Amino acid sequence: MSRGGLKWTVVVLTCRHRDSEVCFQRELELRQQCGSLYEGALVLTVRDREEPVGSGGATLNALLVAAEHLSNRAGHTVVTADVLDDAHILIMHTGRDFPWSSCSRAFCWLPGEKPGQKVQAPLCCLDLLLDRLSTQICPGSPPGVWVCSTDMILSVPLDFALSWEGFSGVRVLALPGDVSYAADHGVYLCDQQGRVRDIVYKGTEEQIQQALMPDGKVPLVSGPVFFSRSVSEKLLQTHVTPPLNGCTYLGLDSGAPPLQISLFLDVLKCLCSDLTQAQFVSEERGGCSSVVGPQGATVRDGRAELWRILRGTPLRLVYVAGGHYDYLTLSGKQHVQRLTCDWSDRNTLSHIQRESGVSDGARVINSVVEGDVAVATGAVVQHCHLQGPLDVPSGCLLSGLEPSASRCIRKMKLSSDIIIQGHRVELGELKLKVFTVTGARDDLQVSSDDGHASFLNQTWSDFYSRTGIQAEELWVRGEGRSLLEARLFPVLRPRGGAVGLEGGVAWLLGGGVGCLRRWREAWRLSLREVLSLTRQEAELRWREELLFLAGRRRVFDALTSRSDVCLLPCFRAAVLGGEQGALLDTLDDIAAGPREQGAEPGAELGVAARCLSCIADVLVCMARGRGGLRSGPAANEAWSSAYLLLEEGNLWGGVHALAAQRADWLSRPDLLVRAARHYEGAGQVLLRRAVMSSQRFISIGQGEVLPLTEWQEVECPARLDLAGGWSDTPPIAFEHGGSVTNIAVRIDGKRPIGARARRIREPLLLLVSRSGGREGGVSTGMVCDSLDDLSDYCQPHAPGALLKAVSVCSGLVSLTSQHALGHQLMERWGGGVEIQSWSTLPTGSGLGTSSILAGALLAAVYRCTGRTYDTDALIHAILYLEQILTTGGGWQDQVGGLVGGVKVGRSRTFLPLQVEVERLSPPDDFLVALEQRLLLVYTGKTRLARNLLQDVVRNWYSRLPSMVQNVQQLVENSEECARACSEGSLSRLGRCLDRSWEQKKLMAPGCEPASVRTMMEALRPLVLGQSLAGAGGGGFLYLLTREPGQRQVVLQLLNDMPGLGDFSVHSVELDLDGLTVLPTC
């Protein structure tokens, strides 16, 4: 049920077979857990009495059981009608066996999936019906009882709505049908006010014509029935009213004889205005129990009681013009056509190894298809595990077949329109697999003596002639001689055991290893008997096994092919089905890759990192919403050995070490969540190693070493990300490809970021960082005279971590060297190095400070040690450094601050990660106008969300559809922004800024503080576009104003707004140079 649909109090599913109760109950509960049934509903599966009681009797019994459960829940000791006062009860009948789905029509799979489902699940007739009832037909109805059969596919117009004003009594919904179609069904006769006069079942054409509606159709006896609360109470009293109590389980337990009652032709017909009591009680009518013979008196008495209890209740018709009713008949041809023509999904929850072998007009439902299997247009494969080579001709239906059947079918050389099914049956204590075969064009119910009767699409006489079988061997004298009753299918041989596909079905088709003698020796069953003996629990289990096997293989394909398929619904389904163990094993195998060492290209690291994130998803699913927050620390010592293996490049060993440790963390929800955090941590290790593959694009040359004490000083502008931010973030940058358009800017006329370095005589490292500018602000200094002083360089919150990481990554010293720090410095550089950095920007500004500062530091260090570089090398060196520093992040900050002007940076969908920068050449007047209209507003808010990056990466690895779509739009917006700048369009640029901000909010929900939202709404009339810089959450807001020179106007507007706090407004100038080396003093 979709969100906002009717919240049922009770949902009851009736069934005929003993083993259906438990397995159908589980199916209902699974749907409740999946969210397709209201979680607060009481779901019940109720078995009918052994003897047929009809749809009316099943309704009375189901209502009794529902009321009894509600009475018990309310604390009553007897059944009371008071529980109906506020109850919305839904009763669904599964009805008779269906030859083309071994688990009734209700659980007949359809070739489609419900869009947007959170848990991957089949779409059955029951699911379609539940959705139609819960979201379209029943919402708004008063308390009462809805009754509906599951033997149909029902559709109503999207704008359909029922009015309940002034309603009382009983209401029936009728779908339109042709007169010719109605000849095999029932129709309602009603007056102009919608009052039902009579119900005609399989009437003459003249009778049916009386029911014609203005649209030329007739109202079929097809849809749901609603009984109001008062009428429901009257129905409930039948459980103590002989002989009607014979329909209920209480009657059975009390020794009451069974009574068969039809919902439409008994319960509803007694409400029809044209009938007299005598007609209703004594009339013989098709589809009902006979009023003559041994049970005649009981039937008449039952009808008389119905008349006494219900007569006078208004019965009204709602005709659903534009609706559609598709009854699932016994026709194999119609069913195959239904599956292939009414639905467009070629592959439904299946794994098909060679997709090209399945024609567009074919349907493969919940199956595993291996090898060279060709499925022709108009053919259906459902609930099968097939192995090629194999051809499935047009019109065929293969169902319930295991891999061993493929070899036999291969030998048969099937012709078109053949239906082969495998059934799991129970004969006493024997559990057997039985195979049946029919022709799709065969009529199962017509007598073999009929001129149109056939078996395997050929006349019975042709079949007898070909096989030597005689009619007397198929039917017992006195029985109906229909195909449904023909004992055709061998099951057991006296000395040979169970009969397989080759010895039974294949021989009937004209091949195989059987013969007439062996066929005659075998114990045989008819199709009707096979259906009645089917173990529905085993059938549902087989379907489930295939669903999860196909799911695991689709997971393998999605991950190894690096597709953008969201796997979370599959993971949730596996956990609900108890299949998480096999799923985790599959993910382990994908992540580990081949065992051979050295066969680990960067692409494998990307796949493995996503796999580890998927394992984290599965573990969180297993916690079922308990166990704490998803984000948290991931440095428990128990996982360290696995992490170390991954860091060392031993992917296979690391993944298996993780799996071994995982086994100790599965017992409680809190442990599962903590294990998930450590799997994400392991994924970050692999992601860092994958991004570090960019090291190959770092080209550093050696020049002349500069004199001691001579400073090499560089300054850098900040960057404003105009569009595309987040698409540069690994793994998005190399799995989807990134594009970011940004500009380098001076703030209040100054470059806010700088660094300088010089060689000094003492063999040590002197590291100084300043906030507030080169000369002012707060400075932090440290002296490193041993390698131990640098050991925390990879801990981003350690004092001087960035300066230490620069010292290591730039090659000033090597931490793995056997030589002391001082010895290395003297050997390499003839002395120590002093490094200083500064920034005038606040922490969390969103202007790319840390990455740009890393670039300035690297440039200063390289220059003071006589090494040469280019901007491209610096961009990739910063990527590498930030992986060493474990801060992650993308490449757009350094592109924005190191390269001047307006530019677009791009990365493509492969590893190693390479960034390519295109400097744009906008018109000069555009640059002037842009500079006049750009303003920065410091919001006074510091970004507090420390897990933004982790959340974004997690959601990307999960391939949430909204995330994948948004990333694509980020890239598209960046490219549009680049075109807008190149073509000099301020208005288009403004729209890009606004789109970019909306996209950032989708990437990282919660990045827009309430005060900032208020500020942006107030500024909207003044701007062409605006956005928080960087990831948002605080820091700087940049504006593209409609008019030039608006700083004072903006300042005044914000000053007039209460509660904004410590904000400030800053001017912006374009910086066309980027990283700039200052003259030596």
Image: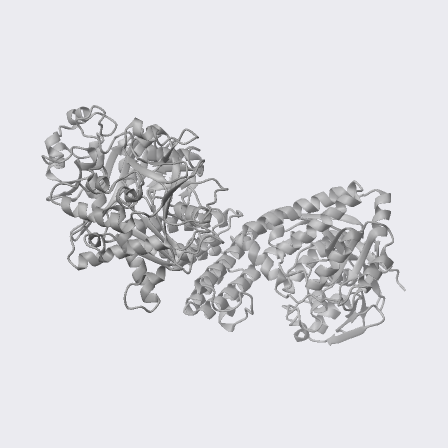
Q: What colour scheme governs how the chains and residues are painted in the rendered image of this protein? A: one colour
Displayed quadrant of residue 108:
top left
Instruction: For the C terminus, give its image quadrant.
Output: bottom right
Decide if residue 439 is on the left or right side of residue 830.
left
Q: How many marks?
A: 0
Residue pictured at 35% horizontal, 67% vertical: 74
- Name the foreground residue: 200 vs 810: 200
Residue 706 in view (yes/no): no
Pick the residue in front: 374 or 697.
374
Nearest to the observer: residue 229 or residue 705: 229
Residue 520 position in % (x across, y down) = 11, 36
- Which of the 4 image quarters holds residue 45? bottom left
The spot of residue 1069 in percent (x, y) is: 85, 54
Q: Please state if 718 lies on the left or on the right of 490 as rendered.
A: right
Residue 670 in sight: yes
Residue 971 horizontal/vertical position (percent) = 66, 47
Q: Is 1072 in front, or is 509?
A: 509
Residue 295, image x, y percentages: 14, 45
In this rendering, the answer to whether 150 lies above or below 119 is above
**Dividing the picture into quarters, in which one does residue 112 lie?**
top left
Residue 739 position (above or below residue 634): above
Q: Residue furthest right?
A: 1081
